[in-house]
Image (cartoon, helix red, strand yellow):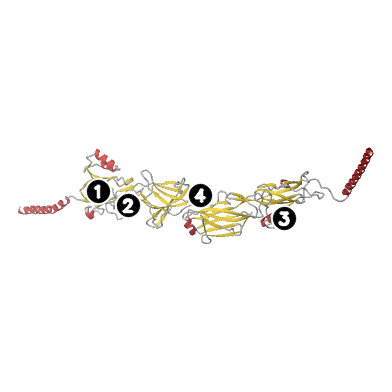
Amino acid sequence: MRKNQKRKLLVAVFSLALLAGLLPQMAFAADPIATDVVIHKMAVQQGTAAVDHDGSELATPPGTPLAGVQFKYWVVADDVTDAQKSQLAGLRDLAAAEAYAAANPSVLSNPQTTAATGADGTVRLNNMAEGKYFFAEVSNPAIEISDYVGVPFLLELPAMKPDGTAYYGTGANAMHVYPKNVIATPGLDVETRNSDGDPIGPSEMDLYKWNEDTGEWEYVDPFTLPNGTITLEDLESGKYKLVNTKAPDGYLVDDRPIYFEVDNGQITFPDYGPDGEPNNPKAGFEPGDGDINDKIFLTLEEEPKPEKTVDGTDEATYQIGDPITWEVTIPVPSEIGDYEYYRIVDTLDSQLSWVGNGNVVVKAGATTLTSPAAYSTSISGQTLTVNFVPSALKAYEGQTLTITYDTVINATADMGQLAKNNVSLEFNNGHGGEGTTVPDLPPAVWTGGIKFLKVDGQNQNMTLPGAEFKIATNAAGTDFIKWNAELIAANSTGSFVTPATGQDIVMVSNANGAFEIKGLAGGTYYLVEIKAPLDSNGRPYNLMRDPAPFEITKTSYGANASDAVKILNNQGWAPPMTGGMGTLLFTLVGGALMALGVVLFFRKKKETASAIS
C-alpha cells in the first residue's frame, strides 16, 4: 500500500514538472506577433505580369519606384469565407473596393489610409496586428495609370518566412510587398515641318532605343510620316532617338539624332543623348496639354536652288561674237559651314564659247568675294565649275550669291535655234542631305540671219548680180554693222567684199542675184545699197533711194532659196549720147534747118521791099 502511494506521488510530481515546463512555452505562443509591412510601389512597362512573392526584400525590384502613391486598407473578418475571398480578389481598383466595403461591412471594416510613398517608392506600416487585410491603391491624378499588377491585394499576418524558421516581424525582419502600376504609355506626335511651321511630307524616320546594359542603340522600327505627322503609341520607359532618313521633295534630309526620354509616362527632351551627342538643333519639343500629345518636330531646310538669267531675262538674242553675260543666283543656306561641298556646274551649249576664262565674278549682296579664299573656278571644255568654300560663306548665311560670267555665240550657231545654257547646283549638307538642283527654266540665247535676192523691178525673174549693200542699225542708214572674227567664220566670205575685222560689212549679190548674212541679233535693220547692178547692156540700174528695213527673227533665215527677200532695182531714161553716128545725124539735120530758115528770111524781106516800092 505504501509502495502504491509512492508511485502515485511520483506520477503527480512528474506531471506537475511537465506542466511547469510547458507553461512558459504556452505563454510565449500566445503573445501577439506584430509585423512591419513595407510597400514598394513600382512603375512597370506594358505587358508585365504578376508573379508570386514570398515577402522578402528584393535586391533589384522590378520597374521604377513610384512616389506619391497612397493605399487604403481594411481589416478583413476572421470568418471570411473562400467565396468572399474570391470576390475580394476580383476587385480591380479603389472604387470597386469601397463599393464592396459599403455593401459588406461585416467583411471589410475599419478603413485606414497610408502615407504617400516617398522618392524611393516605399511606405512603411509599423507594428501591424495579426489578422487579414485588404489593400487598394488611392489614385494619384498626376500619374496616368493604364493597368495594375498585384493591387488590390490581400495580406494575412503574421506571415512565415520562406525558409520556415520564423515569422516576419519588425525592423529588419519586416515583410516587403511589391504592388505595381502599369504607367499609361504616352502618345508622342512626331512632325517634319518647313520654316513656316507647317507640316510637310511624306518623310521617313527611324526609331532607336538605348540599351542601358550594353550601352548601345538598338533599332526599333522605321516609320513614314505621310503628311508630315505621325503619332507613336505605347512608348515604354527608356531613352530614344529619332533619325530622319527621307525628306519630302524639295527639302533636305537632316540625319542628326533627335533625343527624347520616357519616364513613368512623362516625355522629356534632353540637350544631349546618352551617347553624349548634342540633340539636333533643328528639332524642338512642344509639351502637350490635356488631350493633346507631346510633340517633337524637325524643321527641314529647303533644297538650295539656282536661278539663272541672261542679261536679266530668260531669253535674249545676240550677234555672233558679241559678249553675253550670264547671271546665276543661289542662296547661302543656314549652317553652310557644315556642308561638305557647295558648287555650281555650268555646261555650255555647243553654239556657245567662253570669253577667256569666263570672267567669273562672285558677289554676296554688294560684297565681291575673292578667289581662292571664298571660291575656286575651273573650266574643262564646255563646263565651268565654281567650287565654294563653305566655311568662308558662314558670314553670309541667309544672303544670296550672284555669279556672273561671259560667253559668246560662236560660228557654229544654227540660225534661230535656242542655245540653252544649263546650270546645276550640287551640294551635301553634311547631315545626309545631298543632291543636284536646276533652275525651273534654263535661259537661252539665239542669233538669226536672212537671205536676199536682187531682181529687176519690171521683170522679177531677172536676177541682178554685182549689187553691193551695207547693213545699218538706224533708219538714216548711217550706222553700219562691222565684222568680228566670229562673224567672219560664220559666213561664206565669197558673198562679201573683202571681210576684215572692224570693217563695215559689205554684201554683194552673186551671179544668181543672191546674198545673205548670218549671225545678227534679232531686231530691225536697214539695207543700204552702195553700188547698183548693171543690165545686160552694161547700163547701171538706179540705186535704192532710201534704206530698206528688214527684220531678223528666229525664222527669218529660211531653209530654201525661195525664202529669200527680193530687192528690186529699176532703170531710169537713158541720157543723150555723145560721139558716133547719132551725133552726126543730129548735126546734119540741124544745119539743114538753119539754112532753110535763112532762105525764108531773105525771101520775105524781098517781098516786103517790092510791096513797099
Residue under label 1: 115
Amino acid bearing label 2: Thr
Give the structural element (helix, strand or loop) at label 1: loop
- Depth order, front residue of 503/262: 503
Q: CA distance from mark 3 to mark 1?
A: 110 Å
Foreground residue among 231 and 211 = 231
Q: Quadrant of residue 496?
A: bottom right
Q: What residue is shown with label 4?
A: 250
Label whose residue precedes the other's in the sequence (2 or 3): 2
> Disc 4 marks which amino acid?
Gly
**Res. 493 mark:** 3
Say whether disc 4 or disc 3 marks the residue closer to the N-terminus: 4
| Percent of width and height locating residue 568 | 75, 46
Disc 1 versus disc 2: distance between alpha carbons?
19 Å
Q: Is residue 226 left or right of residue 493?
A: left
User: Alpha-carbon distance for marks 2 and 3?
Assistant: 95 Å
Q: Relative to 16, does residue 96 appear above or below in the rendering?
A: above
| CB within 8 Å, label 1 to label 4 | no
Residue type, numbered disc 1: Ala
| Residue 31 visible, this orientation | yes
Between 178 and 94, the one nearer to me in the picture: 94
In-image side of 541 versus 604 (left or right): left
* Element class at badge 2: strand
The kind of residue tagged 3 is Thr
Q: Quadrant of residue 293?
A: top left
- State left or right for residue 143 relative to residue 481: left
Q: How many angstroms separate mark 4 from mark 2 (CA)? A: 45 Å
Q: Residue furthest front?
A: 613
Discs 1/2, front:
1
Residue that label 2 marks: 64
Mark 3 element type? helix
